[in-house]
Amino acid sequence: MLSLVLAPAAPATGAAGGQAAIKMAALQATLARLAAKYPPRPQVAPAPAPIDPAATAARHALARAHSAMFDARAAKYALRDDYRSGPGRFAQLRAAIIRCREAQATYAAAAAAFHASPAGAALQVARAKYPRF
């Protein structure tokens, strides 16, 4: 696609100015011939791919499970620095560990469901194109 914008040349004085004007006119004539010979092609946008509701639901479930797992893990790790000596301390730790394990299991199930969906298969095909280091 040829797109050039030329400003009119400044008036030149003397013999060098006359030659520059002749060269500029020849250049403009050549550009006009090329523009007529090769008109700009219209840009055609590809049609968007259809959105699969099942793949979207699988992605959303995976994202929610990942967020819940991250929050449970952060809550468990936050209890590391809590050194108070109370009767409910170990029960609180145990509950945080159990919630973290449940969230990890939920995430594993959501990841398996996503990778079994067509979107997961497409992701694996895209990943296979690039080597891992």
Image (spheres, grey):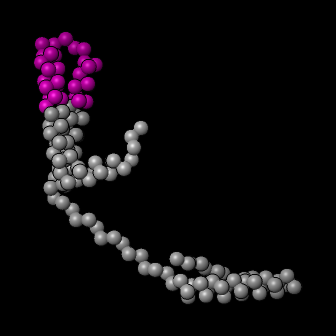
Q: Residue at point 60% right, 79% down?
A: 5
Q: Position of residue 19 (x, y in %)?
A: 81, 84
Q: Is residue 103 visible?
A: no
Q: Residue at point 17% right, 47% down?
A: 116
- Could you tell me how many numbered marks the image carries? 0
Q: Residue furthest right?
A: 14
Q: Position of residue 105 (x, y in %)?
A: 15, 33
Quadrant assignment, res 31: bottom right
Q: Residue at point 36% right, 50% down?
A: 129
* Region of the chain picked out in magenta, as a range: 73-102
Image side of residue 28 versus residue 105, left or right: right
Name the one closer to the observer, 25 or 118: 118
**In the rendered image of this protein, does residue 119 appear above or below residue 35?**
above
**In the rendered image of this protein, does residue 117 appear above or below residue 94?**
below
Q: Is residue 81 magenta?
A: yes
Q: Position of residue 66 (x, y in %)?
A: 22, 40
Q: Position of residue 75 (x, y in %)?
A: 22, 28
Q: Residue at point 19% right, 42% down?
A: 111
Name the one closer to the observer, 2 or 13: 2
Q: Quadrant of the C terminus?
A: top left
**In the rendered image of this protein, does residue 126 appear above or below residue 24?**
above
Q: Is residue 24 visible?
A: yes
Name the one closer to the observer, 63 or 1: 1
